[in-house]
Image (cartoon, rainbow, N blue to C red):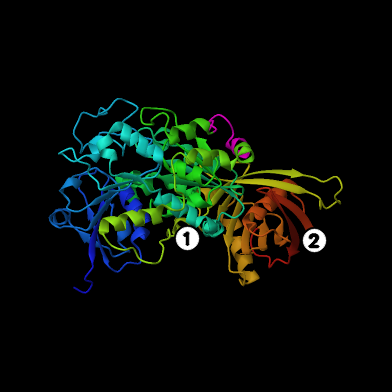
Amino acid sequence: MLFPEARSVLFVVRTATTLHRLLDAAPALAGDRRIRLHVTLVPGSEFEADALAPLDGLRALQLPWEEATQRSFALILAASARGELHRLRGPLTLLPHGAGFSKRMPALPDEPGDGAPAQPEGDAANGLHPDQLLRPDGAPLARLHALAHPGQLERLAAHSPRAAVPAAVVGDPTLDRLLESQPRRDRYRHALRTGRRKLVVTLSTWGPESLLTRRPGLPLRLATELPYDAYQTALVLHPNEHAYKGRFGLGLDLTPERKAGVLLPSPYEEWAALLVAADCVITDHGSTALYAAALGLPVLGAYDGGSELLPGTPMARLLEAAPRLDEQAPYVRLLERVLAEHRPESVRAVAADAFARQGNAVGELRRRLYALLDLAPPPVPPEPEPLPLPTEVARRSPAPSVFALDGEVDADPGGDANGAGDMVRVVRRPVSGRVGDHLAAKEDWAGLRHVQSAGLLYRHWDGHAATASVREWSAGVLAAYPGCRTAAAVLAEDRCVLRVRDGGLLDMRLESAPAGVDPVAALCGVHIWLVKRRAAVPAGQRVRCEVGGRRVVAVLQPLPDAGAGPG
């Protein structure tokens, strides 16, 4: 053999969730050429579709299930006890596939029984039930059952002392990966184009009690009610939702959300990067919220009760302590209050009941795995793998192309006759049914019905575009769309050229604009000011715009017009 001490290790995958857990734990075996890793899919889950998809780019060695049952392995790792794992030959290490063991165990179609819990209600935690953890002969299924907290070990021992024999507390590798990634938070937010906005992440588990099932309109309402220049929103769905609908079906379902700018991360790695980047989460009873709490994030509860959440568990206590999302109250006011009153130590204290050995899980897991392998571990200590930049999710969720605008123009009594002291407060919201006082649409990207009805049409141009080209384009826009009052070319971060119906061409430059201010937002403010003013604009006209709590001054200069077309 090329490597005399080679050990064959098998990752047993049942769903995408379990694969993600195994990949997060994989650094425990990193840096060791003696390990030959294979992956197999245990059949039987209704959510097995695309379970191995993250492996496509990794080129992992895959084995058919029946072949895997015929081989012997030095070590087997799984993140779910469901399926016929007793058929595999080799010492099994069982990892959790979630945090906190807070849900009652369901009887899925591939399981025996009529759907009733096998133990009294309140005790049958999914992942800790003895029916899952014992072999047909009553012996423990695993040689090592790696748990995240001593409280989980106590619960397991109370349910089944025999199943608790191989259990040990090692921590949570997924949490350690999140903690390892925290120094990258600013880079994640830059990749997501968050800027100075507050990123609000909605978390939905799967099943009849999930947020998306019970409050299907919530993600879109958040995106279209919160001011776009102050808030960014995202929706994190359980991997089972992705598996059940598929990427195409789920993409169709969430088309309105995507067009409203909602970030829709993939179920592997991207969701975790968004959690690190987030300012606040809204959640049902899914255990992902415990990771948010461990990061110290504000948590708003949107779980309406039911039979799935086990009382007294960390997730139940988190929801009891968290402020509730009131559907009747304006979201902006609620979020402002929650963010202002939040104390990170309060949620971290609840998460501490779900996660022990924080920051040390991979190292503790390595120590125990190599004991099973009967090998000395590599000399270099293992480290969690930081999450990659979420660049793809931002590409899949471009900025909205249509905005409803609400604006107020306040005349400064101290200003001169030209209105140099005027202040425009403008709020942009992605359009979805509701339309504000004004409508702004990206002329070359928005849907035709919005282009035909928008008062402001804009397009991003190369900054070196000839003024004559902009003149011709803007004149053509006003001629083609009678409802348009302002046609604007965005030439740079601090410059636009506008053609105003019955008002001619204007050059707009932003004076000392704060970094990250969207020129389109300032353009929207100037458009509202022009509509209110309806008078000629003198040279050097200054308009102060307030967008998303930030102020920028736009300086307007009339431009000579070639005379073509309206305006």
- Residue at the disc numbered 1: 389
> What number of labels is visible?
2
Residue sitting at x 31%, y 49%: 18
- Residue at the disc numbered 2: 540
Q: Which residue is the extreme one toward the top? A: 120
Is residue 434 on the magenta stretch?
no
Q: Is label 2 or label 1 in front?
A: 1
Q: Is residue 197 left or right of residue 310?
A: right
- Which quadrant, please, contains the N terminus? bottom left
Q: Which residues are magenta?
A: 323-336
Which of the 4 quarters of the picture holds residue 564? Answer: bottom right
Residue sitting at x 61%, y 56%: 478
Classify 10 Å Cα crowding around label 1: few (below 14), some (14-19), many (20 and above).
Answer: some
Under mark 2, the amino acid is Gly
Under mark 1, the amino acid is Leu
Is 316 placed above or below 344 here? Answer: above
Q: Is residue 543 left or right of residue 143?
A: right
Residues 400 and 538: in front is 400
Residue 292 point in image, percent of width and height: 49, 44
Residue 296 point in image, percent of width and height: 54, 45
Q: Is residue 400 left or right of residue 411?
A: left
